Every structure is written in C-alpha cells, then in structure tokens.
Amino acid sequence: MSTTTEFASGVAAAVALAALVCGAASAQTGPVPTQPTYGFGQPATPSDLARFYSSLPDGRDLPKGSGSVAQGKAIYEGQCSACHGDNLQGGLGDRLIGGRGTLINTDPSKAPVKTVESYWPYATTLFDYIKRAMPLTAPESLSDDEVYALCAYILSRANVVGANATLDAKSLAAVRMPNRDGFIPDPRPENFPPPAQAPHETKAIAPPK
Amino acid sequence: MNHHSVPAGEGITKTERDRRRFIVGSVALAGAASLPRPSRAAAPPGAVERPVPDDPAKTPGYPLEDESYGARSQFETEVRQRYKTATPLSSWTFTPLQDSMGIVTPSGLFFERSHAGTAVIDPRKHTLFVHGLVARPRKYSMRDVKRFPSISRLLFLECSGNGLTEWSKPTMPTVQGTHGLTSTAEWTGVPLATILNEVGVRSNAKWLLAEGGDGAAMTRSIPIEKAMKDCILAYGQNGEALRPEQGYPLRLLVPGFEGNMNIKWLRRIEVSDAPFMTREETSKYTDIRPDGKAVQFSLEMEAKSVITSPSGGMQLERPGLHEITGLAWSGRGSIRRVDVSVDGGSTWREARLQEPVLPICHTRFRMPWQWDGKPAVLQSRCVDDTGYVQPTLGQLIAVRGLNGPLGSIYHLNSIQSWQVGNDGKVINVHHY
C-alpha cells in the first residue's frame, strides 16, 4: 500500500469522526458545499491562479514543458553549482546525490547521508521545490522547461534516470525514487512506562580545551 | 532574580554592557545641555540610551514623545540569538527563556525560523487565494480578511527542531540554546473554518496545502479535519499587527502542531484529496529510525517542560531560598501537573501552576527551594490532560533510536537536567 493511500485512509476515518463531533466539519461531508455566509472577497479566476501549481506525487498539476539532462547540466553549472557544488556534493546548499545505503545506521556517531538520491521519496517534489524556491537568490526565476531539465540532470547524476533522459510531466511522475517506500506514518503518541528508578549517568558538556 | 547573574549573548557579558553604558551615560550627563543625544547604537536593541541622573527624583525626566512607538529600558539587554547556520537567509533565532516572565513572549523576542529571509510585504497588495477542491475559488485582500468575525487566542509555537543539538550529549550552555525555539503569544485572526465554509469544501477533500509568499514559498500539507477544527488565519500578535519575521501581514496558526506548519506570509491555500509531499514534509521534518525507515507527519508537539531559572549559565550566589520556575506546554491540550526534582529524578515534588493554565499554551510553574550548598540536579517533568508523561531522554532514545547526528533530529521533548555545583554554578547535563 502506498504511503499516500495509508495517510488518505487514516484521514478519511478521522474526517468522518470529526463530522460526528464537530458541526463545522459538516461542509465536507455532504455532497453540496455550504453557501457562503459573508460573501467577502472576489472569485479567484483561472488567470489569478495560473502562477500557482503544486504537484502531487501522481503528477497532477505538473505543467507542460520538458527538459533534457544535457540542458540541465548547463543550467546547473550556471545557477546551482555555487551552492550545491560542481559535483552536486553540497556546500552552502544541500548535498544532492549519493548516500544510498547509509539510512540504516546503528552508529550514533555517524550521520545518515540524506540526499535527493538516497532520501527523497518522490521526483515530483524536486520539480515543486526548484520551481518555487530555487535558486535561493532568485526564486521563481526558472522556466518550467528549465526546471524539468534540472530534474533530469540531478536524477541522472543520482543514477535514477539515464544520461540521455528527457523529462516532462508524465515521465517525471513515473520516476520511481530509490527511497520511495522509506517513509511510514508516525506511530505517536508513544506511551512511556513510569520513569526508570535509578539514573545511571551524568554527562556534562566537555570543558573547552 | 537577586541571586542569579544571567549570561548575556553574542559574546558580550552583562558586566561589559553595564560598563559601556556607564561610560556613555557619564559623558552624556556631563554635557547634557550642549552635546547631541548619544547615538542609538550605544543602547541595547529595542532601547534608547539616555543620560542617567544621580537622583532621578531631583530632576525632570525626558519629555513624553507623542507619536512614538515606545522602547524598553536601556538597562534591559536580553536578545534573541541566531544559530550560526551557513547563511542568515535560512536560519533560526532563540528566545531568551532564562529571562522570561509569566507566559507571554514579547513580540521582539519571539523565536524565528525562516527559509529565505524575512519577506517584506505591503498589506495593501497582499492577496490570499483559496482554491482546489472547493465549490467557489476565492481571493481575499487583507481588508477582506479583516472583515470576518475574529477571535483571539493564547497559543505557544515550537519549532520541531527545538533541542536538536541535545540528543547525543549536552551541547548548548543555556536554556536559550536548549529550549529557545518556543514562545507564546496572543494571536488574533479569523478561524480558517470560516473561510473554508465560504468557499465550500468538496466532500472528497482530505488535505490542504498552505503556501507562504516569501522567497522559499514555504509549503506544508495540513489534514482537513485539523483545518476545520481550530486553525486561525492570524494577522495580530500581542495586541498589534504581526511582526514581519512572524509572517506579516498574514500567517496560518495550526495550534499544537510543528512550528513550520504555521505558514508565514500566507498567500495561498489549495484543498486536495492527498498530501502534497512537499520538501518540508519528506526530506525535512522527518526522522530516520535505526532500521532506515523515516517517520513522517509527526504533526503534534508532545508535552514538554523545562526549568528556566535556575538554568545553565546562571550562578547561585549563596545557599538559602531560591525559586525554581519554568515553563510547561503540550500540543495536545492543557498541562495537568508539573513535578520538580532536585536530586536528579530520585524524588519529585509537585510544583504550583500559575494561572491561567490554558490548552496549547505555555504554563508557568514555580516551586520554592532551599539550596543547602551541595551539588544538585534540577529536573522538571510534566503531565498533560491526555495523561501523557514527559519522558526521560533515555526513554525517548529507547523508542526513537539514536540514529546519528542527522537521523533523529526533531521532536526532542525529554526531561532537561541542570546540575548545580557546590560553587553554585549551573550547567547543562544529561542525567537519566
């Protein structure tokens, strides 16, 4: 079962419960949404909303356009490498590739290496994030074609797509990320037994040398 | 706070500041009639440096300043401190909890976290769009938003990364560093449910996306039942407009949930049937367990408490009566009880809770303590009204794992220990 479906079914049950206990929730339980009480504001038109699109993992609402690995390489070198490194190794910005196999970790002194390649569950998130927030000093400056190209380049360097790949709405949503099944719903609230009787150790900050 | 000397931040000790102030004050007083007013740079942030007379009862004070905004006393020096991330455009600042009084955080000391700096937004040009699985997509100016019936509510916010440095070993010397990513304010705004009912949410809606209008366009998915239950579109904080760094002119409040979900500079809400899986709910704000699986959508902030005085970096000057005081809070409800131990958790006594005790709000606790001059380990442990008991760090690590410096990062809510030495020095320790 996919992560999305698990969350969706859990929330559906919660919504049904909320509808029973909370009158305000009745809006989404009936087939006909409530009529407005106040009528303030204005209708949001398609042209108002054209600037905004947030894709879901199934690729809904991804824009038209496409970009290739080669195009992405050129854009990356001009706009991204200063912060993310010539080899996508990170710097001021996050490391983007590598780290597979480091998430299972029992060594408290060793950090798992969390990158697009090793950790990110959905390729659509990469498009969404670059489109909205990158580059740091000029967000929303990249065209949709450029963002597809950057996704293609980063994912090819991550050995997730081929070196000659071209990505668009359909092919990006079809990408299966290596850590796709690496996420689980949080099981909390945890239940803690009564606190341990005898504390066993006091550890202080190491004095400066 | 007679018996505690409080460390000041940014490498400047309070004594050093006092000395500078004395020098500036003396010069200004000597030539008060002829010299220009001392430069504001000499005053602590948020204050104006003024001459200090020998006897303030024997001279008029400075004139009332019409149309002025007001400043704090030049003798008060507590400030937020920034965590030294690689860039100040994506960083966080800590509230000086060691100096906190009561439960409300002054707006100028309220902790901050932003991912692309602080946006500057003209409220006359700001628009909130609400669309997606709704019958009537709508846009609202700030004037429109403020026409709706409003509510005010005292709520804490806490960054889910509060304390992230403290998992493996005690690291930050003061409570500002260990716990300063939580603050409380009175927020004013419109219930999100009001506007969702206006646009008519479709029956298959299950999540909504909240998006900021800052350079990061910060986005999080929020369960629709939470949005309908108690979320607020807030434009007021502590009786005035939001501060820019808190999301002026409009932010979302998601009571009791992770700080980062309380989207600042809110510009858009999109209703959907599934979570959007944004960067901030996949690659960030998730915790890897030792088996490699990451827990996701850890939304509620669990019950937590900390002693704010005496706390790390303070100095007890002499044995005798000291008041132990601190804060407790829970994202799931009200604080029911706080116990305090002065012997590292072997014995506990119930602290007095200061009214008001409100759900999803800082609660102040107090307990008088006779210090006998011997070493002591001070701890507080809270219970919320769901019955949840604040765990020890050992209990938390047993459940979550200690999965390396970047494994389990978020949601550290365990009992904090402050060790008092026989010299009266208070330091941050792990004791469990």
Image: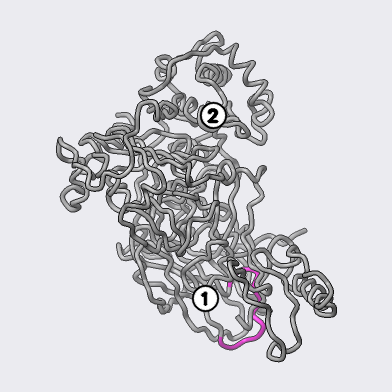
> Does residue B30 sit above or below A130 in this rendering?
below
> Does residue B252 sit above or below B216 in this rendering?
below
Identify which residue is drawn at 57% across, 62% down.
B109
Identify which residue is drawn at 67% across, 63% down.
B45
Q: Main secondary structure of the magenta part?
A: loop
Residue B55: where, in percent of width, then height? 73, 89
> Does residue A45 sit above or below B57 in this rendering?
above
Residue B342: where, in percent of width, then height? 52, 77
- How many callouts does the rendering have? 2
Residue B317 within the segment the image draws in magenta:
yes
> Callout 1: helix, strand or loop?
loop
Q: Give the quadrant of residue B2.
A: bottom right
For badge 2, the amino acid type reads Glu
Chain ID at mark 1:
B
Which residues fall within the magenta stretch? B311-321
Read off the residue under disc 1.
Answer: B343
B291 or B326, nearer to the observer: B326
